[in-house]
Image (tube, rainbow, N blue to C red):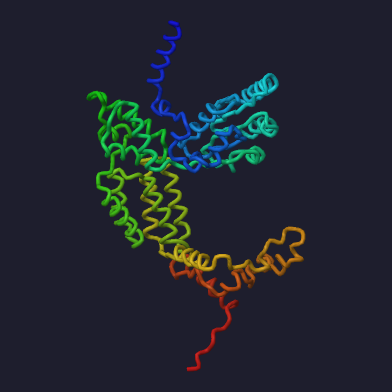
């Protein structure tokens, strides 16, 4: 009895000392935030978990979105045995031991086994292949968690035997809810300004938000108890300043930033970039806007602009601030001085309007239909298709639009930058394909 009491007290103390994110791990599906498309009542994943009929799955999503949390909930709700491995440290030997236990368990008491494999993308091909026969036979139900695109990182045979569930980055409301739960668990309070700064810097990562909150609470406790977290505590916990302008000015500054680059003024673009960085604006937010602008306002006038904007966004993740300010600066200068065209924007807008105005219409011309199956030619599918690469010029005259849209122009290139070359090519081809316009008798 005394041993039991001692164990309970020790467990309670250990629980209190464990990370806040671990202490707040949901115990029911209803407590999971931000993944309602998977675990809300009536959704497929929830139905499978509650019925204990889950087959092998891959959870794919950014860090801190709930992959491990949902897997732990499955462990608590299933009648199967639950084994857990990390692909970072596990070997083929560890996998074979799990398989051997699963065989013994199934033979002795008819109990199945679920294997949760964290960071499944870290397993190489031979390690993944070691799992395949057991997954294929149903001896093991695999739950793989990965932050990387499984179509690139998971062996196709293993992926084809698993259902893929995509977890999304947590939205602001979800992370605010997590922070409020964390404050309640810590017996602390926080200003709205401090909470919003923690949320803004979380980047959709719930675990990061809770870890930062835990540090902020510890800093606040140094002053007084119960802890009252201020913006200074949040800034210190994150190592980043909060925005020093209001929400309205936030939108005004980013608007000035975009319009300066659109207006080809690199000096103004750099100034507004500096204002945002000094204010503590999220560099990833700035980079996202540059990637959008590269297609929205420059497009094919300078195709390199999209690559440079995307490279600056990647540099923020790979290099980080303050060094990544150099990559942002280069992107701003390139985009501001590049020739401008909004025709990629207007082109897709025109095409979507045409598609929306004629739903169900726009039949695919017979020559363009799939002809790679038996009987297709008898239906006329693919018959008459002319392969452009067979022509020395790499282009042949051919109808690609539905009959009712022949002659429509969704994309009209400008005479700016590289787009001028596109305009010349398009003009030459249209002179070959367009019917002659009627001559005005006057």
Specify whether 237 is left or right of 2: left
For the N terminus, give its image quadrant.
Answer: top left
Residue 100 makes an appearance in the image: no
What residue do we see at 48% from left, 34% from top?
29
- Within the image, what quadrant is residue 13 found in? top left
What residue do we see at 28% from left, 27% from top?
219
Residue 155 in the image, given as x and y percentages of width and height? 64, 38
Residue 187 in the image, given as x and y percentages of width and height? 30, 26
What residue do we see at 77% from left, 59% from top?
374
Q: Nearer the viewer, residue 7 or 79?
A: 79
Q: Nearer the viewer, residue 356 or 123?
A: 356
- Within the image, what quadrant is residue 333 found in? bottom left
Q: Nearer the viewer, residue 423 or 54?
A: 54
77 over 151 or under it: above or below: above
> Which residue lies most toward the bottom here?
442
Specify whether 270 is left or right of 388: left
Residue 265 in the image, given as x and y percentages of width and height? 32, 60
Number of disc labels: 0
> Which residue lies most toward the left here?
223
Specify whether 160 is left or right of 350: right
283 over 215 or under it: above or below: below
What residue do we see at 39% from left, 39% from top?
174
Residue 183 in the image, given as x and y percentages of width and height? 32, 30
Residue 332 makes an appearance in the image: yes
């Amino acid at each position: 009895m005394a041993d039991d009491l001692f164990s309970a007290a020790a467990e309670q103390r250990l629980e209190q000392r464990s990370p806040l994110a671990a202490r707040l791990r949901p115990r029911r599906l209803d407590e999971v935030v931000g993944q309602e498309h998977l675990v809300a009542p009536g959704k497929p994943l929830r139905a499978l978990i509650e019925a204990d009929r889950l087959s092998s799955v891959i959870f794919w999503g950014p860090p801190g979105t709930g992959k491990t949390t949902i897997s732990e909930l499955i462990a608590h709700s299933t009648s199967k045995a639950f084994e857990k491995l990390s692909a970072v440290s596990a070997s083929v030997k560890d996998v074979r031991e799990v398989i051997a236990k699963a065989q013994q368990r199934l033979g002795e008491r008819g109990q199945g086994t679920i294997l949760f494999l964290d960071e499944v993308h870290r397993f190489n091909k031979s390690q993944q292949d070691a799992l395949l026969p057991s997954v294929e036979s149903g001896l093991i139900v695999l739950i793989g968690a990965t932050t990387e695109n499984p179509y690139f990182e998971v062996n196709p045979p293993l992926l084809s035997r698993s259902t893929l569930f995509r977890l999304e980055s947590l939205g602001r409301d979800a992370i605010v809810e997590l922070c409020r739960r964390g404050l309640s668990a810590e017996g602390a309070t926080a200003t709205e300004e401090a909470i919003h700064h923690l949320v803004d810097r979380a980047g959709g990562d719930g675990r990061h938000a809770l870890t930062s909150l835990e540090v902020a609470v510890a800093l606040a406790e140094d002053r007084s108890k119960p802890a009252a977290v201020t913006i200074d505590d949040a800034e210190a916990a994150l190592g980043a300043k909060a925005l020093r302008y209001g929400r309205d000015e936030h939108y005004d500054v980013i608007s000035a930033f975009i319009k300066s680059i659109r207006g080809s003024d690199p000096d103004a673009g750099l100034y507004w970039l500096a204002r945002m960085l000094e204010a503590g604006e999220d560099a990833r937010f700035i980079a996202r806007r540059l990637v959008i602008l590269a297609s929205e306002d420059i497009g094919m006038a300078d195709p390199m602009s999209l690559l440079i904007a995307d490279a600056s966004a990647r540099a923020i993740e790979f290099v980080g601030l303050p060094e990544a300010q150099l990559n942002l600066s280069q992107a701003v200068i390139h985009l501001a001085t590049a020739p401008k065209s909004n025709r990629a924007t207007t082109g897709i807008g025109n095409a979507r309007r045409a598609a929306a105005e004629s739903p169900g219409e726009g039949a695919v011309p017979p020559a363009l239909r799939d002809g790679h199956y038996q009987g297709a030619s008898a239906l006329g599918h693919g018959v008459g298709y002319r392969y452009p690469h067979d022509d020395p010029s790499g282009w042949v005259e051919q109808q690609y639009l539905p009959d009712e849209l022949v002659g429509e122009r969704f994309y009209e290139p400008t005479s700016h930058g590289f787009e001028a070359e596109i305009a010349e090519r398009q003009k030459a081809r249209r002179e070959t394909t367009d019917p002659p316009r009627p001559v005005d008798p006057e």
